[in-house]
Image (tube, rainbow, N blue to C red):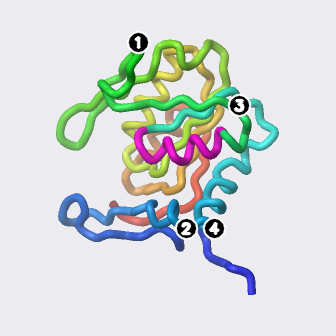
Amino acid sequence: MANSKTVKDYIRTIPDFPHDGIMFRDVTTLFSDPRGFRIAIDQLLHPYVGVQIDKVVGLEARGFILGGAVAHQLSVGFVPIRKKGKLPGKTIEQKYQLEYGEAIMEVHDDAILPGEKILVVDDLLATGGTAEASIKLIERLGGEIISAAFIIDLPELGGRARLKKMGIDLHWLCEFDGA
């Protein structure tokens, strides 16, 4: 009988991490299973086969794993967007709000050329703050966002609505209720 597990079946939920009341969606169990990882990468890239994409942008940190694999399969370049202070070359930065405070994302200032078609990839869409900051960085460099793809969407946290309001096409593989 064929394996009928879905991507969602490979994701472990850890209650009360990193704080009480949070249901942490752990994709490391998906990554560690060869079939689960293959299914996820295939499903992430499927809508973009035959679409002009010049580069895949992966968001720190699990987006590097997914984005690198998707870029490889699409035979395009990969660009990391990282937290401030992690990239060695000249960068541009974008501040964004966290639940308690502020953070900064950075990208090399020569990583994306004007007019390049970009696919943004990350593991999880929650509030959309990190994705929005990354999209703003890409747009400041002149990149054109084709779409943003995620393994998990947490719709109750508003990220999907936030990015759609920005005019971003979205693709996700599964969703979970709650935080």
* Disc 4 to disc 3, C-alpha distance: 26 Å
Q: Residue at x 26, y 39 (%)?
A: 98
N-term mark: 2 or 3: 2
Element at label 3 = loop
* Disc 2 to disc 4, C-alpha distance: 6 Å
Number of disc labels: 4
Is disc 4 in contact with disc 3, using a CB cutoff of under 8 Å? no
Q: Position of residue 151 (x, y in %)?
A: 53, 55
N-term mark: 4 or 3: 4
The residue that label 4 is drawn on is: 35
**Amino acid beneath label 1:** Lys
Element at label 1 = loop
* Disc 4 to disc 1, C-alpha distance: 39 Å
* Disc 1 to disc 3, C-alpha distance: 24 Å
Residue 36 placement: quadrant? bottom right
Q: Nearer the viewer, residue 66 or 117?
A: 66
Is disc 4 in contact with disc 1, using a CB cutoff of under 8 Å? no
* Disc 2 to disc 3, C-alpha distance: 28 Å
The answer to whether residue 120 is above or below residue 84 is below
Region rendered in magenta? 60-71
- 4 vs 3, front mark: 4
Q: Residue at x 49, y 56 (%)?
A: 152
Is disc 2 in contact with disc 4, using a CB cutoff of under 8 Å? yes
Q: Nearer the viewer, residue 153 or 92?
A: 92
**Amino acid beneath label 4:** Arg
